Image (cartoon, rainbow, N blue to C red):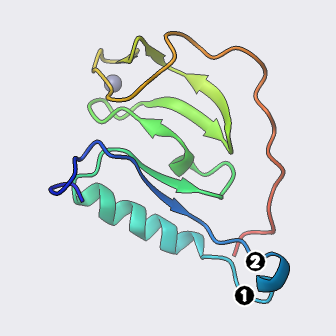
């Protein structure tokens, strides 16, 4: 993907949660998502995410230059926002994408926890 599209195309690994008619199946192990995350990063993809695991550090966006968390999320809520005009507040790197010019307004929305991990 990094060579065919761009290393800046976001890649999400979302955890399967057993619900309704598939409630008998196990959830995706967090370790599987983390292994996929690590492989994607090693292959040069710069914006990799782990989804459906509330509070996991893989929910966040990290600056590919300085490694600082520039958007800290919990579910769909933004808890911290360190971009100004698409520029990393920590090191000045330009981050590809469409961004708010300043911190989004309003209170973050708490996302209910899913079933227990693993
Ligand atoms: Zn940075």
Residue 108, picture quadrant: top right
Q: Secondary structure at mark 1?
A: loop
Asked whether, in this view, residue 89 is left or right of residue 1, the answer is right
Asked whether, in this view, residue 5 is left or right of residue 110, the answer is left
Asked whether, in this view, residue 69 is left or right of residue 108, the answer is left
x, y (%) of residue 83? 45, 18
11 vs 68: above or below: below
Quadrant in the picture for the C terminus: bottom right
x, y (%) of residue 102? 54, 10
User: What's the residue at 52%, 16% (across, down)?
Assistant: 100
Q: Earlier in the sequence, mark 2 or mark 1?
A: 2
Cα separation, mark 2 vs mark 1, equals 6 Å
Q: Dot 2, how many residues are within 10 Å of its Cα: few (below 14), some (14-19), or many (20+)?
A: some
Quadrant in the picture for the N terminus: bottom left
- Name the outermost residue toward the bottom: 24
- Name the outermost residue toward the left: 3
Residue at mark 2? 18
User: What's the residue at 70%, 84% (across, down)?
Assistant: 26
Residue 53, picture quadrant: bottom right
Residue 117, picture quadrant: bottom right
Mark 2 and 1 residues: CB-CB less than 8 Å, in contact? yes
Asked whether, in this view, residue 20 is left or right of residue 33, the answer is right
23 vs 116: above or below: below
Residue at mark 1? 25
User: What's the residue at 59%, 14% (across, down)?
Assistant: 103
x, y (%) of residue 70? 46, 27
For the residue with label 2, is its CB less than 8 Å from the closest atom of ligand 1? Answer: no
Q: Dot 1, how many residues are within 10 Å of its Cα: few (below 14), some (14-19), or many (20+)?
A: few
Q: Secondary structure at mark 2?
A: loop
Q: Quadrant of ligand 1?
A: top left
């Amino acid at each position: 993907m990094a060579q065919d599209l761009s290393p800046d195309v976001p890649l999400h690994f979302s955890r399967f949660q057993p619900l309704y008619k598939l409630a008998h199946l196990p959830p995706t192990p967090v370790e599987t998502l983390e292994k996929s995350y690590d492989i994607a990063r090693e292959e040069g993809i710069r914006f990799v995410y782990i989804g459906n695991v509330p509070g996991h550090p893989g929910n966040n966006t990290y600056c590919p230059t300085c490694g600082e968390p520039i958007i800290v999320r919990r579910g769909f809520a933004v808890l911290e926002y360190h971009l100004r005009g698409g520029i990393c507040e920590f090191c000045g790197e330009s981050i590809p994408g469409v961004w708010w010019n300043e911190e989004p307004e309003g209170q973050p929305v708490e996302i209910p926890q899913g079933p227990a991990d693993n």
